[in-house]
Amino acid sequence: MNISIEGLIKEIISGINLRFQTSEYLLGKENEKMLEDILYKELMKPSSDQSRTPTQIVNEFLQEEFNQSFAFTPAHFGEKAHQLIMEWGMQKAKDISE
């Protein structure tokens, strides 16, 4: 992976917090840290070993934490996060095809 995983995770967390400003939910620092760790652990694996997308990880985590179904897409996290997720996907496809 050539993209910055740390930057991607930062933008995703920022996007969630922005989305939650207009909802009843609050991610909170403890949940932010847990989600960052989960994302980092999965996205630092070799591309062929990654089993979930960043968006899948986020939706599953939020569902577990809030006992509510979430259907975030990359666009829900903001323009920059969306772009980084798309770059991550393209890089993953390239890595796997090599």
Image (cartoon, helix red, strand yellow):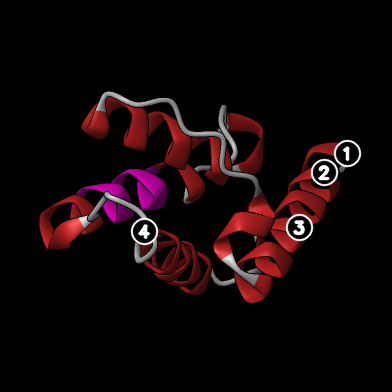
Q: Residue 38: within the magenta? A: yes
Choose mark 1 or mark 2, whichever is in front.
2
Determine crowd level at label 3: few under 14, some 14-19, many 20+ residues with C-alpha closer than 10 A: some
Marks 1 and 4 sit apart, C-alpha to C-alpha, by 37 Å
Pinpoint residue 66: horizontal percent, then vertical percent: 25, 33
**Residue beneath label 4, please?**
20
Marks 2 and 3 sit apart, C-alpha to C-alpha, by 11 Å
> Of label 4 and label 3, which has the lower sequence position?
4
Marks 1 and 3 sit apart, C-alpha to C-alpha, by 17 Å
Q: Residue at x 56, y 61 (%)?
A: 77
- Secondary element at image label 4: helix
Three-letter code, disc 4:
Phe
State the extent of the magenta-drawn residues as a range.
Answer: 34-41
Marks 2 and 4 sit apart, C-alpha to C-alpha, by 31 Å
> Of label 2 and label 3, which has the lower sequence position?
3
Task: Examine the rendered structure and indicate whether residue 37 appears above or below residue 58.
Answer: below
For the residues bearing labels 1 and 2, Cβ distance under 8 angstroms: yes
Disc marking residue 93? 2
